Structure formats: structure tokens, C-alpha cells
Amino acid sequence: HTAVQHAVGRGGVSVVALPGDIADQPAPEKSAGSALVTSRPTVRPGDSEIDALVRMIDAAERVTLFCGSGTAGAHAEVMQFAERLKAPVGHALRGKEWIQYDNPFDVGMSGLLGYGAAYEATHECDLLILLGTDFPYNAFLPDDVRIVQVDVRPEHLGRRSRLDLAVWGDVRETLRCVTPRIRQRTDRRFLDKMLKKHADALEGVVKAYTRKVEKHTPIHPEYVASVLDELADDDAVFTVDTGMCNVWAARYLTPNGRRRIIGSFSHGSMANALPQAIGAQFTDRGRQVVTLSGDGGFSMLMGDFLTLVQYELPVKIVLFNNSSLGMVELEMLVAGLPSYGTAHKNPDFAAVARAAGAYGVRVEKPKHLAGALKDAFKHKGPALVDVVTDPNALSIPPKISAEMVTGFALSASKIVLDGGVGRMLQMARSNLRNVPRP
């Protein structure tokens, strides 16, 4: 009971071990399940921190919000805050599912997987407010603007960047205290400038994605992610393998407040998507659970695929099969090393799935992709869609320097795509309607 309570309450990575001699002992007569914590308490900042934050905000002319997973449950409060400030809102990868949807202030994502105008918005403001994010890529954070960080975990405050003010509190409670006290802004010039930059950036990159993509073989992985996004349920749970699948999920999966996007975003553990999908599907057998799996990650834990068959879990595996450890190869290129040991001689994974007693289909041509996904989604049991994708497809951040290249490479021997952005372009175009025309 104590071990589970600690794991749930801390909300981190946990292992609960039950030794055989303990398991053999009589169980308590009364279940302890009802005593377990199910939610964390709200944390209100002290009055002095709230007063200081209000003063800093009122003194600033150009404010940008950058949001992480700590904004979960605070979407309405962040939108109200942004509206009062006329502030652009960017996000980290773990903040995407909580803050991007229904967001007229959206300027995209910063970091190695970034897109749009989030980088510019965080660097051209005079006050950057970090809301519930432990964003680790400090090379993408400014060092010449004032920075405030709001976080419920005090150990996160100031860990990634120099702060002018640290506010210990959860995002929703903090904004509820602060928003009514700050002055209402009417000047939209900075916000509108960033919204236009965001839309222009997405307009530019979408060309690489749309050029003959429906005829290209091997299939563009961007195309796979885009079609998957359109066909998946509105409340689907996506689990995403570490590596290039993170890129495609970040740029193509559209959040709506009901979907979940789960990955090993803090620890970068390989082969995480399939076991996470098993846990998600056990929790709710009636909800659609879809993995974005790389061939390397899937191969590492193929035994877990038998778990799906054993327990008749209807997980749908979308396998991005480029016969390569793509991210590892990029890291080797960055280090100036020739790729070694990154190529795979893969089996026909669809045939393996069928042999195991599951539904399996292999897709080698773009025109067959949508039909294969629809059939897999209709299947009542576990299903695997083995999609042969282009191993030469890379993705680069919107801003890049020598210090930012870790994990990415620009190589003349590779086909470097700027990367499409799926339905996010439509959102950016929609938000531009609020920008006054000269």
C-alpha cells in the first residue's frame, strides 16, 4: 500500500516489487484501494510572489507564454491569461496535447522537434513566462530577456535557465490569482506579428511535404503520420516510440483535448510505445489505442506483441519501417562518424503478426495506406500495419546552430525535408483571421 501510494503521489517512474514470501502471506481483509491518492493538491504561490509577478507583467510590453505538461487541466486559464496579455503561446513537446487545441494564440513548438514561430516569440519578447515546463534544451531559450517560471515542483525552478522570478505553484491556481490583477492589453502588434510568422513558416515547410508525396516510394513517414491523424478516433490514445516517431507525432498528431499522446519524453527510453499501449488498453478496452512504433523499437520488444494476442487487447500498431535506427544514425553523423550497425534486415512484420494470430498487413505504396489503416482500425483484436517508409527522411528544427545539432544532422547524402505540419497549418491560417489587415 505504501509503495503504490508513493508511486501514484509522486507521479514519476516507479517500480513496485512483490517478493514471493510476501505474496504468499494472507491479504488484508479490507482493500486499501479506496485510500490511494487519485489527484494532487493545488499549490498557491505566496502573496509576495504573486505581487512580484503582477508587477513584472504590467511592466512588460511584449510577453510570451511557453507551456509544458504542467498546463494539464489549465487550458481555459492559460487562454484567458493570453487573451488579457495579447501574448503568443508556444509549447514544448509534452505541452502539445494540453495547450495547442482551441488556441488562437498558438505559435508552435520550440526545441529540436520544433516548428513555426515559437523560437522567435520566445526571443523577441521582453518577458518570457514558462508555465509548467521543465524544457531541457536551453540552447533554444533566450539569455537576454527577463524570464519567469511557474512550476509546482520547486526542484524544476531555475534548473534550465536563469530566472528573474521563480513562482512555486501549480499553473491553474497561479493564473487564477494573477489574471484578474494584471492590466488588460489592447495592443496586438507583437501577437499578430508572431501569428503571421508562424503561418508563413508553416506555409513554407508544407511544400516539401505535399510535393508528389502520394506517389513517393518508399513512403514518406510524414504522409503516414498525417493520414493516421485524420483516420484515428477523436479520443484515441497514441503511444510514441523514442526516435524519429517523436518527430512525426510532434508535427502531425492533432490534439483536441480528448486525445492522449504518451511517450518516453523525459527519459528517452527505446521501445516504449508497445508496453505503454498495453497499459493504456488494459485501462480501457473500449478506447482506441494506437502506437507509432519504429522498426528498431518494435523489434526489441516483439515478445510483448504476444501479450496483445494472449489477452486479446485491440491495440493497433502502426510500424514506421525504414530498416534503420534513424535517430542513432543521425547522432553518428553529427559526431562525424560513418553510420555503423544502424541498418536492419527486417522480416515481413505483417507476416509475423499473422503467424502470431493477429491481424497483419504490409503497405509499400501510398495509395494503399488509408485502406490498410481503416481495415486495421475496424478489426476487433490486435492489428499491425507494417509501412515501408523512406529511411532518408530527416527533419530539422526551424532554428539551428552548431550548439543545437545534438541528435540531428544536415548531410548532403541525405534527403533533408523541412517537414510538413499536417492540420496545424489550417489552425495557423484560421488564427490569422484575427490579425487586422492594413
Image (tube, rainbow, N blue to C red):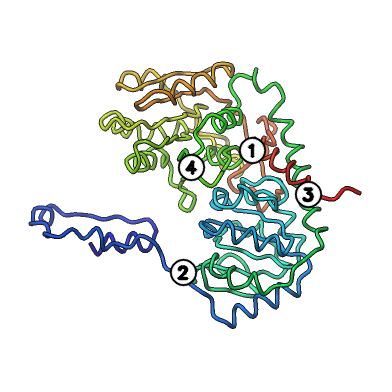
Residue 54, image quadrant: bottom right
Q: Amino acid at mark 2?
A: Thr
- Marks 1 and 2, how far apart at CA: 39 Å
Disc 3 or 1, which lies upstream in sequence?
Answer: 1
Tell whether label 2 touches label 3 (CB within 8 Å). Answer: no
Q: Nearer the viewer, mark 3 or mark 2?
A: 3
Report which residue position mark 1 lands on: 395
Report which residue position mark 4 lands on: 242
- Marks 3 and 1, how far apart at CA: 30 Å
The answer to whether 115 is drawn above or below residue 417 in the figure is below
The answer to whether 320 is drawn above or below residue 189 in the figure is above
List x then y, in percent, for residue 174.
56, 70
In terms of depth relative to the viewer, which is nearer, 373 or 401? Answer: 373
In terms of depth relative to the viewer, which is nearer, 277 or 136? Answer: 277
Disc 4 or 2, which lies upstream in sequence?
Answer: 2
Q: Which quarter of the image is occupied by the N terminus?
A: bottom left
- Marks 4 and 3, how far apart at CA: 37 Å
Task: Give me the residue at 55% from left, 65% from top.
Answer: 171
Q: Amino acid at mark 4?
A: Thr
Classify mark 2: helix, strand or loop: loop
